[in-house]
Image: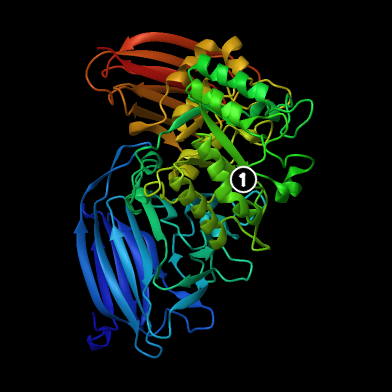
Amino acid sequence: MFKWANLFGKNEIERDILSPNGRIKYHFSLKSRHIYYSVTKNDKTVIKSSRLGFLIAGEEPLRDNLKLIREQKKKHAETIELQWGEDRFIPNNYNETAFYLTEDKDPKRIFTFRVRVFDNAVAFRYEIPPQPKFRQISIQDELTEFNIDLNSTAWKIPAYQPDRYEYNYEKNFVHDLSHSVHTPLTIRTPNGFYLAIHEAALYNYGSMTIKLDENNALKTDITPLSDGTKAHCSLPFQTPWRLIMLADSATELTTNRTMFALNDAPTQNFDWVETLKFIGIWWAMYVGEWTWAPGERHGATTEHAIEYIDAAVRLGISGLLIEGWNEGWEGDWLENGIHNKFTVATSDFDLERVARYARQHNVEIVGHHETVGFIDNYERQLEEAYNYYAVNNIHYIKTGYAGSMMLINGRREFHHSQLGVNHYQKTVELAAKKHIMLGIHEPIKGTGIERTWPNLLSREGARGQEYEGGALSPSHACYLPYTRLLAGGMDYTSGIFDLANSVKRMATTLARQLAYFVTIYSGMQMAADRPYIYEERFPEEFNFIREVPTNFEKTVPLAGEIGEYYVVARKDRNSDDWYVGGVTDENGRRMHISLDFLSTGVYEASIYSDADHAHYRDEQFAINKQTKRVSRNETLDLYMAPGGGFAVRLKKLS
């Protein structure tokens, strides 16, 4: 057993931890018995000296009177293979130092501060072991700072709001961040670096938000519980990794996968997990054709479900989402969600018959659990509800938490509090036991746990297309790759072709709807419109949706600026084919896309791009479609109209 008390402690130290390529330096210091850090890249400051530590309820702060009693260094280099995602292989190369610290005065508590420095990121966390008279703690505040140049530019959404993460991104100077904001928080420094402050491996702790502190430094603001504390933890305990992704350009930032590398490999067999593309009894309710609640226009009837299964077969789509099938949607469902029943179907829906019919036609049913945030009600039924789906061979569930707060143990809690985090994790782990895959709406943000739990295929966690009809601007989808999507895939409910519907008029062009299947990744990808729209009006355009994969080998960003435009190429994991997508804001752009990412040989390019007169307001359906042969030495000249985009399939010819 390690004898802490017998080691000589150091009260003043300076240590540099370099990235494997030597460009990034993490500087750790112990000064005046307090610990600090800073970060430079290419010898230019990214983060100035920033404090570390905790305030603990009923205890002295864990920040003062510190001394170093041991340090341990290691180098690590490996390549990780992800089961599904935007890239199959990601590097996990870093230099690590663990600093073992104690207080030089009573109560002489001990903890470890662990740092990893990658070629494109730095990460650190606190680890607190059990010790005499210190076995449980209540975190009052985490003092971790990110002391950025206040003249840096930030792209942010507010925290602690009724709609959780579902807000439009805004561009501000860091010195104007007067209220807490969510992570990932993307920042451009005056000396030209791009970074994103986020966290990885979030378990049993409140989600990290960021705010300016009294020192005018960005500081962690852990989402509180209803009792005012940040977290209650039994020791041993380790915080999530505090992650700072670093890049020289906005597009480089979009391929930073360090978040996944900071999570553990799976400890069980997940060979049964498969990504999915699906249609849904969903959008018809949004445009008023059907209702979630039972009645004359009820959407989730047995008859409608069978019709949609037949349509999925004709369209070549593997899955069908059914919403509104269970008891609890009557009246004001946001208020009445406490009465939702997750094993009782409405009188006009025969779940067993529908599931059997789907199985006969090789269509996966995506079950639906809308909790409205009434967690006490949901967890009482959770085991039985998952068993109900499992025995009916339903292997996918879309869960929802549409309430402004969660009701847990009879108290109102934030979705991203410690109790919320623990609830979401409970559903993921139970689903894994039942061989069920999840797509979570109104989720806790992604922190890379999909590496450990690959059955968590998708999340929402930002404004999606249900906000179309006036609450989304074309720039929104141009922010997402540089902000929200740094936290993993998102269910954006893409592929809505009925653009001019009077109830939900879309601020996009037709070509842009195809582009979303490339620019916004999801392991559960929805073709959200009604089948007859695809079959009767746009069968040729739907070919792209049918063909585009939900699992990629490699992602190559081609061009973009935050909030303005984004162009990306992705290679299919199961073939030599590539897919390219581009979206723009309210400004039209002509793009010259080099195909030098292709291998040698000839490809057939199927191109869907905006016509020269296309516009998201009044010429939404103006689209150019062409097919031609190309090679890696060529360039595609493509137009993106205001609010538009393009999509390209590059099929390798033998």
**Residue in view at x 29 percent, y 72 percent:** 99
Q: Quadrant of the C terminus?
A: top left
Q: Nearer the viewer, residue 472 or 451?
A: 451
Mark 1 belongs to which amino acid?
Tyr
Count numbered badges in the picture: 1
Q: Report which residue position mark 1 lands on.
A: 167
Residue 363, given in percent of the width and then of the height, sits at 50, 24
Q: Is 440 on the left or on the right of 199, as rendered?
A: right
The image shows residue 281, relative to residue 182, as above or below, that is above
Residue 587, given in percent of the width and then of the height, sits at 55, 28
In this view, which residue lies farthest toward the bottom?
A: 106
Tell me which colouring the rendered structure shows: rainbow
Q: Using the rendered image of the protein, determine whether residue 444 is visible from the camera's viewpoint.
A: yes
Disc 1 secondary structure class: loop
**Residue in view at x 67 percent, y 48 percent:** 372
Residue 324, given in percent of the width and then of the height, sits at 67, 35
The image shows residue 397, relative to residue 136, as above or below, that is above
Q: Is 627 on the left or on the right of 352, as rendered?
A: left
Residue 184, given in percent of the width and then of the height, sits at 47, 51
The image shows residue 617, relative to residue 370, as above or below, that is above
**Residue in view at x 33 percent, y 57 percent:** 122
**How crowded is the residue under tag 1: few (<14 C-alpha within 10 Å), some, or many (20+)?**
many
Q: Quadrant of the N terminus?
A: bottom left
User: Which of the 4 image quarters holds residue 380?
Assistant: bottom right
Q: Nearer the viewer, residue 513 or 553?
A: 553
Q: Using the rendered image of the protein, determine whether residue 587 is visible from the camera's viewpoint.
A: no
User: Which of the 4 image quarters holds residue 326?
Assistant: top right
User: Which of the 4 image quarters holds residue 650?
Assistant: top left
Q: Nearer the viewer, residue 479 or 519?
A: 519
